[in-house]
Image: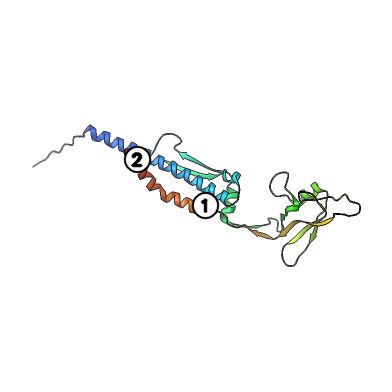
Amino acid sequence: MAMKLKLDIDPDIVAMMAAEVAAGERAVTAAMREAGTGLKTAWRLQITGAGLGARLANSIRSQNFPKSGESLDAAALVWSKAPVIVGAHDTGPLIRSKDGFWLAIPLPAAGKSLRGGRITPGEWERRRGLRLRFVYRRTGPSLLVAEGRLNTKGQAVVSRSKTGRGKVTALIFLLVPQVKLPKRLDLARDAERAHDAVPGLIVANWVEAKL
């Protein structure tokens, strides 16, 4: 006894399957776009909320893949253009002097570096025309101080007074062997939330596409 089976494919079924695949591609692509944009926004808000400024927050970027079109393999990448700075605030590392000496931390009287960022003792002496004097302290950070006057910005400058009027010993740098940077960000927390939200976003976009 033999039996012959024949399967007829209804064109409507083929069209329905193709439409379902297309809906899935749209849903996955839209979900990944939402997740990536949401994570970028969350990281930027964390950075500004920690008082680290809009410039660092704007270093957070996102990119969707594929860059055009839709795919079931769609993905989103979120990253920082300043990974060292952002990573340091995310991990709270212990910073040591690379040459085994002191880390010089500028105080308000030191002012800013012309190159941006933290001014060094060498640059400070060249710009101010003053010599720094080392003050050792058994407890607490040691100091680099200078004899001069404080200008209207609270920065130490050369005193032109012949009588010594207004001359002060200004604290310019703190000297420490190492610094523990406080952990001010928790980027993994927002990344996990974005990851966990992806299935729900896919379902929501898939249902919305059908409706």
Residue at 52% x, 52% y is 187
The picture places residue 196, in percent across and down from the top left corner, at 41, 51
The reply to whether residue 73 is in sight is no
Badge 2 density bin: few <14, some 14–19, many ≥20, Cα 10 Å: few
The label shown at residue 208 is: 2
Residue at 73% x, 59% y is 175
Looking at the rendering, in which quadrant would you find the N terminus?
Answer: top left
Residue at 41% x, 34% y is 69
Q: Amino acid at mark 2?
A: Glu
Residue furthest top in the image: 11
Q: Nearer the viewer, residue 206 or 90?
A: 206
- Judge left or right: residue 135 versus residue 48: right
Residue furthest left in the image: 1
- Mark 2 or mark 1, which is nearer the start of the sequence? 1
Give the Cα separation between the discs numbered 1 and 2: 30 Å
Residues marked 1 and 2 touching at CB (< 8 Å): no
Tell me the SS state at disc 2.
Answer: helix
- Judge left or right: residue 104 versus residue 130: left
- Judge left or right: residue 47 versus residue 11: right
Q: Which residue is mark 1?
A: 187
The picture places residue 141, in percent across and down from the top left corner, at 72, 62
The reply to whether residue 35 is in sight is yes
Q: Amino acid at mark 1?
A: Leu
Looking at the rendering, in which quadrant would you find the C terminus?
Answer: top left
The label shown at residue 54 is: none
What's the coloring here?
A: rainbow
**Viewer-nearest of discs 1 and 2:** 2
Badge 1 density bin: few <14, some 14–19, many ≥20, Cα 10 Å: some
Question: Quarter of the image holding residue 9?
Answer: top left
- Judge left or right: residue 131 versus residue 29: right
